[in-house]
Image (cartoon, helix red, strand yellow):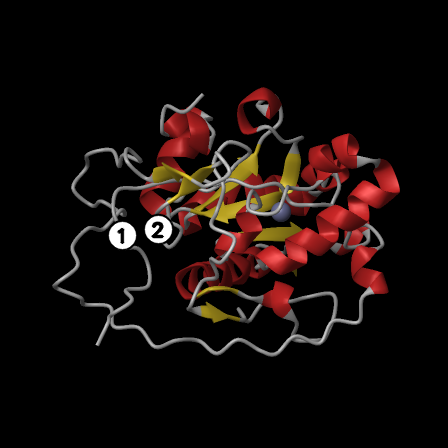
Amino acid sequence: MMKITTCAILLSSIVTLSGCSITNGFDKEKNENHAQHTAQKHTKNNKSDNRSTSNTQGEKPSIKGTTKVGPDGKTIVTNPDDILVVANKKRNLPSDYAPKDLVIPKIPWPFKENIEKKHLRKEAAAAVEKLFHKAKADGMDLYGQSGYRSYARQVSIFAFNSKQKGEEKANQVSAIPGQSEHQTGLALDVTCPEVNFDLNEQFGETKEGKWLKQNAADFGFIIRYPKGKEKITGYQYEPWHIRYVGVKVAKEIAAKNETLEEYFGLN
Ligand SMILES: [Zn+2]
């Protein structure tokens, strides 16, 4: 039996980046009714696969050799299941990639339907539950807004934004299909009542936004698109978009005030 080790466990690491895609009216227009994903069972202690990216030995993970050139000349990442996968405007996820271990984390959401965007990969979901538990204990009113997004859905969102704003502008606020970190199932947009559950820069000024920045790394998350790093990440400041990379790497990145690209020496 092919063992898909949840987490990790693929080669050296890569980091995945992607823009959030501000969907504006898109979500409201669509009456989504996605079938719920069934979490695939994983066997964690997989002795045959020790190519873990979440290196516990202290050496820095590498993302060398984790891309190939696709038929259309685009750079495609070859380790999309890696928790350190890097997807960004230069590193595309395969169009047929979908995580096999998607689950819905038990956290507050501002809507009831169990739709696609409530899902995260199993390891990230467990971590985000701990993050939200601590947030609540500290008096924070955090909500999840958007997690996993399939390639097909990103196609729809990008087309919607292009129609509304033109392609150039659409590319600034939403990711081109294959370049959204949300396709990895490792990214979550977070919000709070003070900003009306919106995703905007103002969230970074709320007590929840400040708490998130301070505490995310303790649970394995980074603020993926920090202020002042727009040229490095390729995306505007997004205080609401967190990305799971595991506690060790998250703490290193936060301590150095880096981005995932800088951590891996990209750009
Ligand atoms: Zn996002």
Vertical position of residue 226 compared to residue 207: above or below: above
- For the point 78% across and 60% down, the residue is 27
Disc with the residue nearer the chain's start (1 vs 2): 1
Q: Quadrant of the C terminus?
A: top left
Categorize mark 1 by other alpha carbons within 10 Å: few (<14), some (14-19), many (20+).
many
> Circle 1 sits on which residue?
10
- Does 257 sit left or right of 12 as displayed? right
Vertical position of residue 75 compared to residue 212: above or below: above
Vertical position of residue 35 compared to residue 116: above or below: below
- For the point 35% across and 48% down, the residue is 79
Distance from label 1 to label 2 (Cα)? 5 Å
Amino acid bearing label 2: Asp
- For the point 55% across and 71% down, the residue is 106
Vertical position of residue 40 compared to residue 208: above or below: below
Amino acid bearing label 1: Leu
- Does 179 sit left or right of 203 as displayed? left
Residue 150 in which image quadrant: bottom right
Tag 1 near tag 2, CB within 8 Å: yes
Residue toward you, 58 or 36: 36
> Circle 2 sits on which residue?
82
Classify mark 2: helix, strand or loop. Answer: loop
x and y percentages locating residue 174 in the rendered image: 69, 41
x and y percentages locating residue 229 in the rendered image: 57, 23
x and y percentages locating residue 81 in the rendered image: 37, 55
